[in-house]
Amino acid sequence: MTTAAEIDAYDIQTHQSTIAVWILTSFAGVFLAIRLYVRRSRIGALLWDDYLLALAYILLLAGAALVSVSFASDIAVDDGKSHFFFYHQLSSSILTLATTWSKCAFALTLWRLAQKVGARIFLVFLIISSHLLVAVSVLGIYIPACGDPKTPVRPYYAGGCYKESVVRTLFIAPIVYGGVMDVLLSIFPWFIVRKLQLKRQEKLGVAVAMGLGMLTGMIVILRCFLQYKQLVGRFGEYQLLRSIPTFEQEVKTNVAIVSF
């Protein structure tokens, strides 16, 4: 049973998170609009990576809307909790795909600039493998874990469950791979721009941008390992507030769209 203190804490956190979600989504939309305007005014047409990034932003908007709907749930009753998890899981799945598409948009940009066949094959591998990991991530979002007291109120629950370690692995592994992909995509441009006749300031700017991308990827990987350890045994604690990692996914998607 959800206590009054938990409901109050839930209301406060979801209110703040809803405001943050839409501020970040609007911020990413401004950056995307500027990118598309500059690309169209200079080149005269949008390219495949622009269209893919625009589709990622459309998914981001849908995910933000679903997050807001899930936060409006009445968690004092079981039907409200089921309502929360239904939209929570759906938004998590959509935002996972949006993050993947934003990274693949940058991979398409690099594919267009790359000259060597091996480099292009490597980028195609990243694009395909990242989409395969989306399926794994969705499984980690939807399948129930044995011992999780929230499982009975989740939608589509039919009575079966999987080991806690399996659910944790399915949930964490795609995030780790996403961090690795961030690092690889951040390093990759250097092999292209190092041969260009750039000024020292321009090379420094490229190095800083790549360093930030690498740092982001490494932080994601480190956070996943720490979160994996923290999840052990936590299914025995029935706190609905701990089931809102969708906000983190929303933030990652916004960052991916802005940075790529």
Image: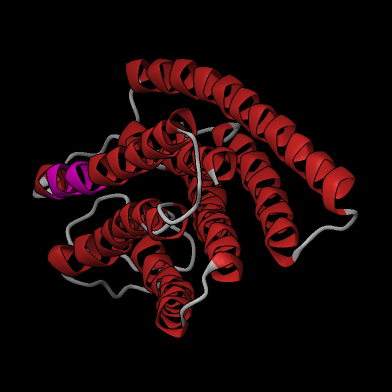
Residue 1 visible? The answer is no
Residue 190 drawn in magenta = no
Q: Quadrant of residue 238?
A: top left
Q: Determine whether, in the image, residue 55 is placed left or right of residue 185.
A: right
Give percent across and percent down for residue 121.
44, 83
The vertical placement of 198 against 51, above or below, is above
The x, y position of residue 131, in whole percent, is 48, 73
Q: Left or right of 238: which side holds 85? A: right
Magenta region, mostly helix, strand or loop?
Answer: helix
Is residue 177 visible to us here?
yes
Q: Which residues are magenta?
A: 221-228
Residue lying at 28% horizontally and 38% vertically, measured from the top left: 215
**Residue 106, placed above or below residue 215:** below
Q: Position of residue 57 (x, y in %)?
A: 68, 48
Horizontal and vertical percent for residue 71?
55, 33
Residue sticking out furthest to the front:
197
Q: In this rendered view, identify the residue nearer to me: 100 or 14.
A: 100
